[in-house]
């Protein structure tokens, strides 16, 4: 699990140096939260597009009084 966490940190852009080593996990958690929020937002946008992709043609008739 530690190896997966290290790979995930590198994938999100964490760097392994002595100056910011103690903040790497916090930065990774914040970037993961931002990534997940973008992913969820994108899924909702795509679901809305798919839902309204080809709506049925509704013929609206005008009623005369």
Image (spheres, rainbow, N blue to C red):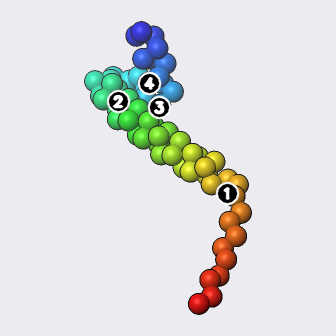
- N-terminal of the two: label 3 or label 1? 3
SS class of the residue under badge 3?
Answer: loop
Can residue 20 be seen here? The reply is no
**Residue 48 drawn above or below residue 19:** below
Q: CA distance from mark 1 to mark 2?
A: 40 Å
- N-terminal of the two: label 2 or label 4? 4
**Residue 50 drawn above or below residue 63:** above
Q: CA distance from mark 3 to mark 2?
A: 12 Å
- N-terminal of the two: label 3 or label 2? 3
Q: CA distance from mark 3 to mark 1?
A: 42 Å
The residue under the point 42% across, 41% down is: 37
Which residue bears the numbered disc 1?
55
Residue closest to the eye, 23 or 1: 1
Quadrant of the rendered structure where residue 56 is?
bottom right
Which residue bears the numbered disc 3?
13
- Please identify, in this view, whether the residue under mark 1 or under mark 2 is nearer the observer: 1
Q: Is residue 27 left or right of residue 49?
A: left
Q: CA distance from mark 4 to mark 1?
A: 43 Å
Which residue bears the numbered disc 4?
9
Q: CA distance from mark 2 to mark 4?
A: 9 Å
Can residue 14 be seen here? The reply is yes
């Amino acid at each position: 699990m530690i190896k997966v966490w290290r790979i995930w940190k590198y994938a999100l852009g964490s760097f392994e140096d002595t100056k910011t080593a103690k903040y790497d996990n916090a930065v990774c958690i914040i970037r993961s939260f931002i990534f997940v929020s973008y992913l969820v937002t994108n899924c909702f946008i795509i679901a809305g597009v798919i839902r309204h992709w080809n709506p049925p043609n509704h013929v609206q008739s005008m009623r005369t009084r």
